[in-house]
Image (cartoon, helix red, strand yellow):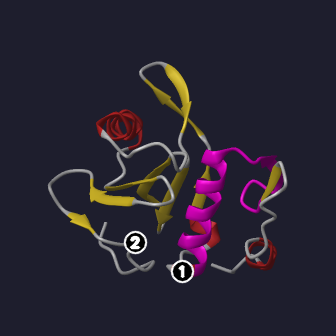
Amino acid sequence: MRPRPWLHSSMHELDPHSDTLWDAFRRKYVKATPEEWVRQDALRRLVLDAGYPSASIAVERGIQVHGMVRRFDIAVFHEGQLWMLIECKAEHIPLNESVGDQWMRYNSATRAPWGALTNGREWQIFQAEGPKSVPMLPAFGTFVL
């Protein structure tokens, strides 16, 4: 998997006063909503901190959930298999049962073995089936599908 050089340079500089953000994954400017700031921060953490290849990440794609099209925030793939589904919320939104329920509805259609919820201040990373949770994002390739 070859790194995308345009990705790393565009992820380092953000203008906090702009009403748009450059999304290197979708390759377009997007509205700088509170949730989008969290999503972009999560993407930077995945790529720059945890070493996830940009080619392994999908952003805001549509999925069918109970007959309706919904959009997940971030999906991470490993060796062509969906590994983690990440739900992002604005910083002021607590990661409560309602947010977890939303993730479970989305995952009923995708069947990711791992999930994560983040509001930028807090991360909850967990195994979809079972009680296992981890305190931080595992480095790419160190996990088991």
- 19 left or right, relative to 44: right
Task: Give the number of the disc on residue 122.
Answer: none
CA neighbours of label 1 inside 10 A, class few (<14), some (14 to 19), many (20+): some
Which residue does the image show at 85% across and 54% down from the upper left? 18
Who's the residue at 28% across and 58% down the image? 126
- Please tell me whether mark 1 sits on a helix, a strand or a loop: helix
Instruction: Judge from the rendering whether residue 16 lies leftward or rightward of residue 39; answer left or right.
Output: right
Q: Position of residue 116 (x, y in %)?
A: 39, 56
* Kind of residue at disc 1: Asp
For the record, the magenta segment spans 23-48
The picture places residue 71, in percent across and down from the top left corner, at: 57, 36
Quadrant of image for the C terminus: bottom left
Mark 2 or 1 closer to N-term? Answer: 1
Quarter of image, res 138: bottom left
Q: How many marks?
A: 2
Measuring 50% from the left and 28% from the top, which residue is drawn there? Answer: 64
Which residue occupies the foreground of this view, 14 or 105? 14
Q: Who is closer to the viewer here, 131 or 77?
A: 131
Asked if labels 1 and 2 touch by Cβ distance under 8 angstroms, the answer is yes
Q: How far, Cα to Cα, is label 2 from label 1? A: 9 Å
Which corner quadrant holds the N terminus? bottom right
Picture coordinates of residue 34, whole percent (x, y): 64, 46
The amino acid type, in three-letter code, at marker 2 is: Leu
Report the front residue among 55 and 30. Answer: 30
Residue bearing the label numbered 1 = 49
Q: Which residue is mark 2?
A: 137
SS at circle 2 = loop
Which residue: 79% across, 55% down?
A: 21
